[in-house]
Image (spheres, rainbow, N blue to C red):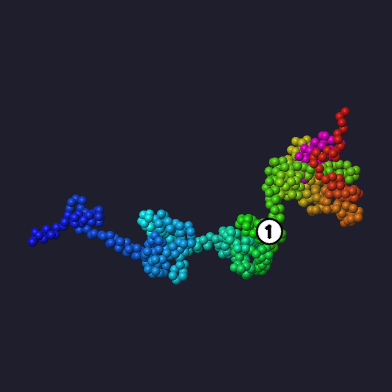
């Protein structure tokens, strides 16, 4: 019996082999019961497949990370408690529901395609951010991750959902600080341009309007009352602008502070120019009411640039440039007003900018030429000299007269090289007349801008040109405007005296339009006064003779002669004017009565030819 019992307890070879196989599979390599040296074995617990699956299920359901298993069909097979708690639902309610509905993966076509690929085992993963709703109605921001389960063809995926609401809220707070002005709490330039760009693309009316404004003389408030009061004024002005925007448009208009004291009001669905100008009037009225700031009543005004146009073909940058330009017009026109964008006026401004930018290059390219208008003695009607008048043969705009570009040249400093060129060319031409024609040689009169005196060594330039051209100094006359020489002191006065000492004639151009300080003439080395054309227009005919003009001109001529100064009348257009000016005592005249400005090659027709060689 005992032997039989021992024999019955002994495992069969197949059962023993199975036990060893289970032990070898489930025992850890270096855990208890494993004795590489052949020692006594100890018992090792066996972990079955069902127990492993149970542990996975327990970990899945107890995990703090919200998760769900999704079948290949896209429906939730099982959701854990954390996912249910995140959405405010029992996990069982989520089972069988479409996972893209639970996780908000449906609307975005590109995301949905990636999601379907993951479900079929053909995609690595999907990660996206979605705004989901809790059962009680509040929203939460989540990060969704979908990972494939098994090899390709097996299908299914693991869906995880992470609550990032706090992180998103922090991002939004930081974003708000980045795109809002800290003083007025209005949108700043960054957010304004974002909204402007979006409005151009999405406007329902197809039109857009913009009012760009700044506070007139705001710097004076900061300088006199301090920056704290200045900030208070900006804040108070911003509130009034917001009220204007809210009360003048359906849903209100965007108000932004662009920087400094500059604000913008954006009308995203404009109904036309009248709407924008009415808004501008409302803003002007609102800002002109005094502000009470720390016990002080502060009054300011504003200048506003108004632009209204179709969205098609308009960019955010182009619209802002137009608004800035129009704001500048409002300032230039006197402040405390609005100005509406005018394409024609803007085209003129753009032309001025193009001309200004190309002036210096035009000098190098040889685009300037000189024309000459005769100056005639009124006593015997003989030729005395010529005034050199510069012209710009512009490749795009044609021949331009000095009124189109001299002011620009004075503004940007190009008048200095241009003036040198005119002086050099005029002296070269006058020397040619002297050598090739008989009779008394005519002088050449060249206009000089006051900036040439300040920004260059005019005396050295004249001395060099006279030496190079070999023109006698007495045949050169330099014309300066009355405003440039009256009250001159220091360098300008020294330059005029040095030029006079060289023998160069000094003339005052457009006399009578500036200071008209005749007593000051005794201090200046002036040889000639050129009366402005406004004084001689009343001399055109005896019928329209102005007694006031005649009295003024007579007095000016008498006083000039007593100071040893000759007088030239400009803009003489007819014989009656010329005769009357001769009787008054004017020494010479210049104008269309004798000739319009002539090209250099036509001047020879007015000069006495040299006698033939013996």
Above or below — where is 418 with respect to 173?
A: above
309 and 429: which one is in front? 309
Q: Residue furthest top?
A: 614
Quickly name the residue at label 1. 341
419 and 295: which one is in front? 419
16 and 186: which one is in front? 16
For residue 366, side relative to residue 505 (left or right): left
- Magenta-colored span: 425-449
Residue 210 x/y as whole percent: 64, 61
Residue 268 x/y as whole percent: 61, 63
Residue 141 x/y as whole percent: 46, 64
The answer to if 442 sits in the magenta stretch is yes
For residue 145, side relative to residue 324 (left or right): left
Q: Residue at x 59, y 59 (%)?
A: 201
Crowding near the residue tagged with mark 1, few <14, some 14–19, many ≥20 C-alpha atoms within 10 Å: many
Q: Quadrant of the N terminus?
A: bottom left
For residue 542, side relative to residue 416 (left or right): right
């Amino acid at each position: 019996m005992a032997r039989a019992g021992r024999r019955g307890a002994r495992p069969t070879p197949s059962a023993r082999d199975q036990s060893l196989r289970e032990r070898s599979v489930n025992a850890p390599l270096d855990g208890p019961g494993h004795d590489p040296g052949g020692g006594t074995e100890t018992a090792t617990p066996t972990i079955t497949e069902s127990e492993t699956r149970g542990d996975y299920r327990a970990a899945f359901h107890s995990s703090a990370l919200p998760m769900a298993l999704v079948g290949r069909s896209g429906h939730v097979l099982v959701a854990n408690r954390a996912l249910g708690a995140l959405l405010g639902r029992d996990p069982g309610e989520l089972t069988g529901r479409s996972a893209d509905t639970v996780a908000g993966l449906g609307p975005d076509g590109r995301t949905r395609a990636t999601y379907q690929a993951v479900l079929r085992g053909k995609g690595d993963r999907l990660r996206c951010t979605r705004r989901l709703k809790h059962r009680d109605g509040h929203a939460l921001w989540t990060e969704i991750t979908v990972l494939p389960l098994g090899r390709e063809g097996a299908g299914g995926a693991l869906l995880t959902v992470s609550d990032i609401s706090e992180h998103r809220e922090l991002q939004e707070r930081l974003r708000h600080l980045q795109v809002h002005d800290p003083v007025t709490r209005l949108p700043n330039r960054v957010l304004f341009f974002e909204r402007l760009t979006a409005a151009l693309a999405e406007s329902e009316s197809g039109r857009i309007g913009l009012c760009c404004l700044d506070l007139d003389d705001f710097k004076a408030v900061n300088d006199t009352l301090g920056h704290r009061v200045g900030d208070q004024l900006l804040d108070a002005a911003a509130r009034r602008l917001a009220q204007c925007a809210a009360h003048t448009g359906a849903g209100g208009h965007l108000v932004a502070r662009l920087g400094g004291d500059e604000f913008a009001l954006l009308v995203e669905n404009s109904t036309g120019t009248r709407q924008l100008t009415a808004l501008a009037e409302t803003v002007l009225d609102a800002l002109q009411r005094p502000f009470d700031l720390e016990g002080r009543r502060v009054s300011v005004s504003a200048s506003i640039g108004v632009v209204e146009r179709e969205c098609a073909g308009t960019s955010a940058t182009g619209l802002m440039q137009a608004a800035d330009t129009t704001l500048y017009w409002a300032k230039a026109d006197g402040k405390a007003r609005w100005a509406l964008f005018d394409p024609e006026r803007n085209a003129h401004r753009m032309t001025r900018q193009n001309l200004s930018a190309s002036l210096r290059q035009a000098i190098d390219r040889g685009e300037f030429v000189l024309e000459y208008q005769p100056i005639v003695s009124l006593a015997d009607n003989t030729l005395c000299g010529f005034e050199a008048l510069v012209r710009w043969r512009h490749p795009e705009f044609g021949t331009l007269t000095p009124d189109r570009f001299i002011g620009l040249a004075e503004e940007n400093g190009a008048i200095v090289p241009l003036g040198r060129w005119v002086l050099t060319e005029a002296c070269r031409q006058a020397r040619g007349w002297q050598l090739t024609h008989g009779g008394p040689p005519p002088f050449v009169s060249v206009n000089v801008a006051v900036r040439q005196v300040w920004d260059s060594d005019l005396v050295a330039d004249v001395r060099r040109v006279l030496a190079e051209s070999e023109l006698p100094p007495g045949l050169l006359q330099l014309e300066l405007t009355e405003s440039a020489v009256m009250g001159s002191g220091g360098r300008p006065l020294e330059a005029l005296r040095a030029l006079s000492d060289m023998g160069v004639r000094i003339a005052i151009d457009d006399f009578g339009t500036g200071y008209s300080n005749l007593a000051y003439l005794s201090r200046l080395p002036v040889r000639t006064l050129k009366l402005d054309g406004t004084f001689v227009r009343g001399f055109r005919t005896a019928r329209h003779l102005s007694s006031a003009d005649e009295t003024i001109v007579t007095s000016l001529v008498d006083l000039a002669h007593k100071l040893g100064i000759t007088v030239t009348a400009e803009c003489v257009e007819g014989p009656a004017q010329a005769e009357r000016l001769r009787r008054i005592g004017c020494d010479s005249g210049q104008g269309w009565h004798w000739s319009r400005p002539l090209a250099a090659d036509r001047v020879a027709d007015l000069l006495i030819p040299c006698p033939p060689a013996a």
